[in-house]
Structure formats: structure tokens, C-alpha cells
Image (tube, rainbow, N blue to C red):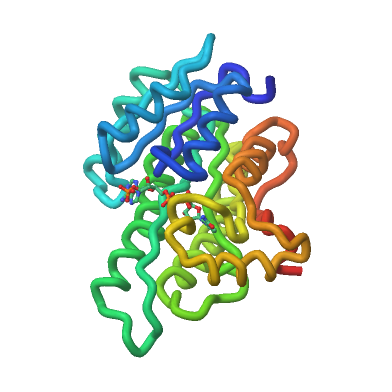
Amino acid sequence: MRLKNKTAVITGGARGIGKATAEKFAAEGANVILVDLKDEEVKDTARGIATDGVQVMGKALDVTNKADVEHFFTTLQEEMGMIDILVNNAGITADAQLLKMSEEEWDQVINVNLKGVFLVSQAAGQIMKEQKQGVILNASSVVGQFGNFGQTNYAATKFGVNGMTKTWAKELGKFNIRVNSVAPGFILTPMTEAMPDKVLDMMREKSVLNELGRPEDIANAYTFLASDEARFITGTVLSVDGGVVI
Ligand code: NDP
């Protein structure tokens, strides 16, 4: 078991990649706290992952609310003692081309994908500094490497996540905190399943393996980066994209 006795927080964990990551972490021996917007949904997901010998809990948390984020981590530290791993997975899209994008669409995506990652990492990072250990993993995207038509706001956040990853790796390394991001290609989750078949086919063709990814592909990368096997890896952006970006 690669994460035995570790405690992990996963944001946006009610479904998709966050849920798959929680399943994998629990199977590897970690206690997992899933947070998400909808209380019932995240608690249902946590119940569904119940694994012998580990705790899996679901809690409601909006990552954009600074007071709630700080309260969540203070309480969690009291309850769990250590917080070893944070996965900043929560992310949204609100697509429109530059000339049509509303200020609201810009603000929504920046708030969750950038400010949310900042707030949660600041609160968790403080605890990890006191512990003198920790791992922070951020959800990036291939869009954070080559941009994407119709995703001005989303691309800005994923390029930004990579910038924060490298900055925090430099700032927090001295406290034995590693910071990395994972850049998924096109993964079949509720975020992408709603897209028309034509678009999914186009995404498949962009992979040199001619495949779409599965949430487990990303969960496996997070598991490796969270584990001690990655003890010498920090400040990286790991592409898990079937060769979309080569
Ligand atoms: P999903 O949309 O399936 O899941 C995201 C979860 O985050 C949802 O449960 C959502 O809740 C939750 N969430 C949204 N806003 C907040 C908030 N303010 N606070 C807490 N939770 C919130 O996403 P995926 O699993 O597809 O993606 C996960 C991450 O991976 C994202 O950061 C995404 O950008 C990234 N990614 C995904 C790719 C893909 O192809 N799927 C490709 C590249 C990157 P609700 O449903 O209530 O809004």
C-alpha cells in the first residue's frame, strides 16, 4: 500500500476524476476527505467508497469561500492531526470565444480554478509547514500547455495553475512540501460526457493512441505523485494525455 496511514483532502471529489482519485487513494491505504459543493452528493460518494481500514468522509465546501476554507482546515487538523496530501481537483468551465465571453463567465472560472486553488493551498500549506511535510497536487490541463478555442478563461487558469505549482515548489521545498500538477488530456467524466459525439471523436483523434482517457488514468498519476516513490519530484507538470501534447 503506497499511501498507508496518510490523510488526503480532494476538492471537487463528488464525481469524475476526484472520485476516481479518492477510490484509488483509499485502496492504497489513505484516509480521504472529499469536499464538494453539494453536501448530499459528496457524502453519497464517500459512502460508496467505504473501504476496510480507512476513513472516507464527504464534506460540503465551496473552495472560493476563504472563511469556510480556513474553518474547514482548522477543524480537520484538530480531527485528523496530519494533512499529508492535498489534491486541488475542483475545476469548472464556462466556454465562449474571447469576443463573446461575459465578465461573469470570466469571473466564475477564475474564482474556482485559480482563486479556489490559491485559498485551499494557502490554508493546507500552513498546516503542512507546521508538520514539516506535505504534498500538494494541482489539476492542470493540456489546455494549460497549448490553449484552446473558446476557452480564454479556462486556459488562463490552467496556465496559472502551472505557474503557481512551480512558484510553490520553490517556496515550500524548504518545509519538505512537494508541489506538482497533472495535465490531463481529454478524459471521459461528467465534464466531457455532455459533449456531442463529433467533438469527442475530434478529441480522440488528437491522441496519438487514438483514445480518450479514463478518470483512473489521472488517479494513477496523482497516486504516484502523492506517494514516497515521487519523493524527489517537485515543480513538475506531468502530462497524462495519450500523447496529445508531444
Ligand atoms: P467534474 O465536472 O466531473 O467534477 C468537478 C467537481 O468539482 C464537481 O463535483 C463540481 O461540483 C465541483 N466543484 C465545482 N465548483 C466547486 C467549488 N467552488 N468548490 C468545490 N467543488 C466545486 O470535473 P472533472 O472530473 O472532469 O475534472 C476535474 C479536474 O480536472 C478539473 O480541475 C478539470 O479542469 C481538470 N481536467 C479535466 C479534464 C477532462 O477531460 N475531464 C481535462 C483536463 C483537466 P458541481 O457539479 O456541483 O459543480
- Tell me where residue 42 appears, x and y as whole percent: 34, 33
In what quadrant of the picture does the N terminus appear? top right
Q: Residue at x 77, y 60 (%)?
A: 209
Across and down, in percent, residue 15 comes to: 43, 41
In terms of depth relative to the viewer, which is nearer, 162 or 91?
91
Return the residue found at the far front: 197
Q: Position of residue 137 (x, y in %)?
A: 55, 45
- The residue depicted at 56 percent of the width and 55 percent of the height is 165
Q: Nearer the viewer, residue 213 or 240?
A: 213
Residue at the far top: name it.
Answer: 53
Tell me where residue 66 appears, x and y as whole percent: 26, 47
Residue at the spot x=69%, y=37% of the render?
Answer: 224
Total marks in image? 0
Left of 115 or right of it: where is 229? right
Indicate the quadrant where residue 241 lies: bottom right
Q: Is residue 192 left or right of residue 142?
A: left
Using the image, determine if residue 18 lies above or below residue 109: above
Point 69% across, 58% down: residue: 211
Is 44 situated above or below 50? below
The C terminus appears in which quarter of the rendering?
A: bottom right
